[in-house]
Amino acid sequence: MPTNWYMFLVAGLIPLVVGAIYYNPKVMGNAWMKANGFTPETAGGGNMALIFGLSYLFGVIISFSMASLVIHQGGAFSMMMPEVMESGSAVQNEFNTLMQNYGENYRTFGHGAFHGFFASLLFILPILWTIALFEKRSWKYVMIHFGYWAICLMLIGGLICQTLQYAPMN
């Protein structure tokens, strides 16, 4: 478990903050409304507390998922299960030594952003295209949303990769 687990809560705010900027009419908001057939009147409304609350919750869930994509050291941990969980075991000591020697490798913002971009390219884009095909949406619709999610996942991946810290196993 991360010692600074609250970073998941911080990263969960990223889609909200990016969305407030990205979908502003002065950035991509007008293009988004046009691609959806919305007017400023039809784009608003709804239960905003529910919309923002669930959006935040989903952002936190995404940040948890991104941790497994951007922090490779978790793979070593899972390979050593369940013995790594036994306090003082040889496997746990070996894991702690491995983390002391290599635990900080590829733990940069840039590395996390790199994986965030590829997650958006390999997961988000195909999902958006599939939805767009069935809903008969335009390529602009797909690219507007892909741009938003690429930015979000790059920032979430970068933040989580750079800042999430784990205590040694004991």
Image: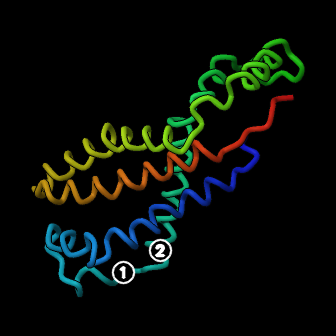
Residue furthest right in the image: 88
Tell me the residue at 23%/84% (across/down): 40
The part of the image, by quadrant, that contains residue 76 is: top right
- The image position of residue 139, as x and y in percent, is 13, 54
Tell me the residue at 31%/71% (across/down): 23
Quadrant of the rendering where the C terminus is positioned: top right
Which amino acid type is marked by label 1?
A: Gly
Q: Which mark is residue 35?
A: none
Q: Residues within 10 Å of mark 1 (few under 14, many from 20)?
A: few
Tell me the residue at 31%/83% (across/down): 44
Q: CA distance from mark 1 to mark 2?
A: 9 Å
Tag 1–tag 2 contact (CB < 8 Å) = yes
Residue 74 as seen in the image, left or right of residue 39? right
- The image position of residue 128, as x and y in percent, is 25, 49
Total residue callouts: 2
- The image position of residue 137, as x and y in percent, is 12, 58
- The image position of residue 21, as x and y in percent, is 38, 71
Residue 9 as seen in the image, left or right of residue 30? right
Q: Secondary structure at mark 1?
A: loop
The part of the image, by quadrant, that contains residue 89 is: top right
Residue furthest bottom in the image: 41
Q: Is residue 12 above or below residue 94?
A: below
For the rendered model, the colour scheme is rainbow
Which amino acid type is marked by label 2?
A: Leu
Q: Which mark is residue 46?
A: 1
Nearest to the observer: residue 26 or residue 74:
26
Q: Secondary structure at mark 2?
A: helix
Residue 34 as seen in the image, left or right of residue 27? left
Residue underneath mark 2:
50
Quadrant of the rendering where the N terminus is positioned: top right
